[in-house]
Image (cartoon, rainbow, N blue to C red):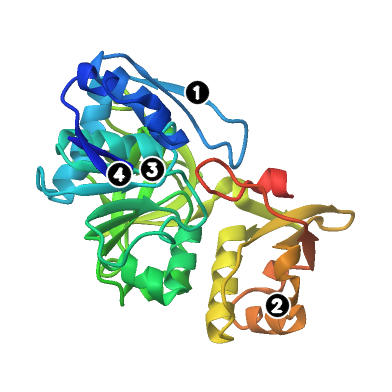
Amino acid sequence: MRLFINHIAYKIESITDLNLIDKSLLNDNEKKAFSFIEKWFTNQDFNFQSSGSTGVPKQFIFTKQEIIWSATQTINYLNLKQEKQHFYICLDTSLVSGAMLLARAILLEADITIVNPSGNPFTLLPQNHPYTFCSIVPLQLQQIVNNEYEKKVLNQFKNILLGGAPASNSLISTCADLKPNIWATYGMTETLSHIALRNLKTESYFKLLPNNEIALSQENTLKIKNTITKNQWLQTNDLVEITDDGFWVLGRIDFVINSGGLKVNALKVEDEISNYFTDQNILPFPYFIGSFPDEFLGERVVLFVEKQNKDSINFDNLKSYLLKNLKHYEIPKQVQIVDEFYYTPSQKIDRNKSK
């Protein structure tokens, strides 16, 4: 592999090559990447922390062989060719999402450029860049497609992984006009990256990668079994529908709000709000559906919006629109304005902290 640092290529084939690089030249994310690569060359175990977007972060330890197994699944599924890739890594390389990009790049003997994570990682890229592979989150993609220059930058890539959070319906619809393959990912820290992918330009369901097995629990939540789970069933909080074509994520059981004894799926309501933005030609902005305690309902449905976007939405118009496709008990009872949202290191909205 070749690491590009300040646009200079360094060929890395051993830990000796790595140690020859002046560490003072590195940005923060490159320093984290060096820690991963050092462990790779010395066959150490890898410790990762989950994002903690819906609870307390947890620590997980994986072996190099498990890292290789997971990375190989993606390489084979996407038919990535060795030595023909240039990875642009703009995710935190101390987390599974960024670290697994490194692992795939190492196995492919690819070129690698690493930048610090940011809300829009394409801002400073030239339109005609050499990069072929990248991974971003939906919030980043939304900002990119809203800017014509950055959309042209994105169109120079071959494959884009999209993970960290569900993509809205309106964002998915924009993918049809983009040149790269945009792959929605399904996975988590516990599964050491994704176990299923969905091409947002051509597919409606997640397709399971080989050597993975799934099933439904009694609560219709997904169970996963593979080498990473030690061939034991791993129980998730994701409500899914499994078909012959793949599976569809309906939402999370821990995002279900009990309002007056009726169940409200927060992600379903968020999707309809996304459709409202498209219908009204409103430029999308971050938001989420949560709840507050209610004396009569137990929980009332609440739309959370940052202060900077509070004038971008007419709540009465939104409620009228939502009533066309949602039940009355699913409609938010109020808009809660907060100064700004908290985000996890993997760029997910930290719902609990933001609320």
Q: Residues within 10 Å of mark 2 (few under 14, many from 20)?
A: some
- Residue 283, position as x, y percentages in the image: 57, 77
Q: Which amino acid does label 3 sit on?
A: Gly
Q: In this view, does 195 lie to the left or right of 10?
A: right
The residue that appears at 43% across and 53% down in the rendered structure is 240
The residue that appears at 23% across and 45% down in the rendered structure is 209
Give the position of the N terminus as an image quadrant.
top left
Q: Which amino acid does label 4 sit on?
A: Thr
Q: Which residue in the structure is indicated by mark 3?
A: 187
Q: Which of marks 2 and 4 is in front?
A: 4
Q: In this view, does 267 lie to the left or right of 156?
A: right
- Residue 298, position as x, y percentages in the image: 81, 52
Q: Which of marks 2 and 3 is in front?
A: 2
Q: Nearer the viewer, residue 45 or 328?
A: 45
Q: Which residue in the structure is indicated by mark 2?
A: 313
Numbered tag placed on residue 59 in the rendering: 1
Dividing the picture into quarters, in which one does residue 271 lie?
bottom right
- Residue 317, position as x, y percentages in the image: 71, 84
Q: Which of marks 2 and 4 is nearer the N terminus?
A: 4
Q: Which of marks 3 and 4 is nearer the N terminus?
A: 4
Q: Which residue in the structure is indicated by mark 4?
A: 113
Q: Is mark 4 on a helix, strand or loop?
A: strand
Spatial CA distance of label 1 from label 3 is 16 Å
The residue that appears at 35% across and 38% down in the rendered structure is 193
Q: What residue type is labelled 1?
A: Gln
Q: Nearer the viewer, mark 3 or mark 4?
A: 4
